[in-house]
Amino acid sequence: LFSAVPLAPRDPILGVTEAYNADTRPTKVNLGVGVYYDENGKLPLLECVRTAEDQLNALHAPRGYLPIDGIALYDQAVQKLLFGAQSPVITGKRAITAEALGGTGGLKIGADLLRRFTPEGTTVYISNPSWENHRAIFEGAGFEVQTYPYYDAATHGVDFDGLLKCLKEARPGSIFVLHACCHNPTGVDLSPEQWTQVLAALQAAGHVPFLDIAYQGFGDGIEEDGAVIRAFAATSLPFFVSSSFSKSFSLYGERVGALTVVLSDADEAARVLSQLKRVIRCNYSNPPTHGAQVVQRVLNDDTLRRQWESELGAMRVRIKAMRKALVAGLAAAGIDRDFSFIERQRGMFSYSGLTADQVEALKVDHGIYAVSSGRICVAALNDKNVETVARAIASVLAK
Ligand code: LMR
């Protein structure tokens, strides 16, 4: 049975970490995966998380099964964070939320749910480029996946006319996966005015928006980065949201995320939730306890919540400083190409414009790892490695 199984390629992102881990050079740097490291190159454990964990440990609580859709206090906290506590989608019971295994888990159960209820032949559109796993997840759920124009390399901005044209020409009822903030991999977001036009085009065509928000708080702030979700919630359009606390709580390994679906009314919401629970039950039965307990404790406690906001704010500020330092470092290394766009990009990533060959040379010659698309994780830079990285980029560009 398995004698003819071909070797699968390494994952385009997590495969970079595998290669990095196998590298024995002490000077190596991993700018591949989207993970925030502090100024000492260490993965932080947030103080708010430490306190919540201390509180939980003191309880020595037994570990029964959770409900299929997870911890109710967690699901409610997710909704309040996304929509605001007084949002009519919450008070009108139009939103349903299920705890999921990270943002990826939210996308997966959302994709499986959509596959069950959308007509045969429904196409999923993802941005060009997009997070590599979007295509894999939706194709894995049985959809045909196409791309909509997004990044314009010439301007380091958005091909907005191309995007609007695609929204208008796609078959009505198509699914559009949209990055709510801090676009992965480009770091280039739509303006509020552009979002208004996108929303109108989605509504006119009866498309299904699937918003992915994995980096809330890493752009301009928690509220600011959630504005797009609130704009969608202010319409009558049903939509999906996958959200993640991996980055914003530095809880990567706990797999804490959610799927939220906003429906037309409370009755529809109750029926869709019942179906979503069936999808979850035959995927992984019910979610794990620890990470979601930590997050709900922090979000539901005023002091811990303030502490989280300040810790997340510090991560955001440090990433912005590293963008500046990288641009300055590249100029100091004698590069005449204008890299100032790196400072305008938002979130953890910079779409550097490096080719796959240049990324390969960075790895082979300098032990610096990035995604072959040229995406580099600015959140892994620090004062100690940024100059080395800038000089290495300069040397591969000069090749
Ligand atoms: C990334 O894009 O690097 C992160 O979202 C991690 C992942 O799962 O790919």
Image: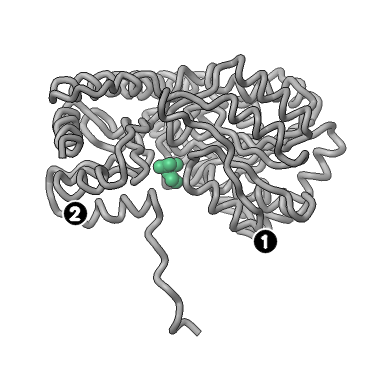
SS class of the residue under badge 1?
loop
Task: Determine if residue 57 is in view.
Answer: no
| Residue 67, percent from left and from top | 67, 49
Task: Determine if residue 245 is in view.
Answer: yes
| Residue 205, percent from left and from top | 77, 32
Asked whether mark 1 lies closer than 8 Å to ligand 1, one says no
Q: Which quarter of the figure has residue 203?
A: top right
SS class of the residue under badge 2?
loop
Image quarter in which the C terminus is found: top left
Given the image, on which type of amino acid does mark 2 rest? Asp
User: How is the model colour-coded?
Assistant: one colour
Circles 2 and 1, Cβ within 8 Å, touching? The answer is: no
The residue drawn where x is 83% and y is 32% is 264
The residue drawn where x is 75% and y is 25% is 89
Give the left or right position of residue 364, taking residue 313 as reference.
left
Give the residue pinned by disc 1.
282
In terms of depth relative to the viewer, which is nearer, 89 or 288? 89
Give the residue pinned by disc 2.
23
The crowding category of the residue bearing disc 1, from other C-alpha atoms within 10 Å (few below 14, some 14 to 19, many at least 20), is few
Instruction: Measure how far apart labels 2 and 1 are at the Cα level.
Output: 39 Å
Camera-nearest label, 2 or 1: 2
In terms of depth relative to the viewer, which is nearer, 184 or 58? 184
| Residue 235, percent from left and from top | 76, 22
The residue drawn where x is 84% and y is 33% is 266
Q: Which quarter of the rendered image does ligand 1 occupy? A: top left
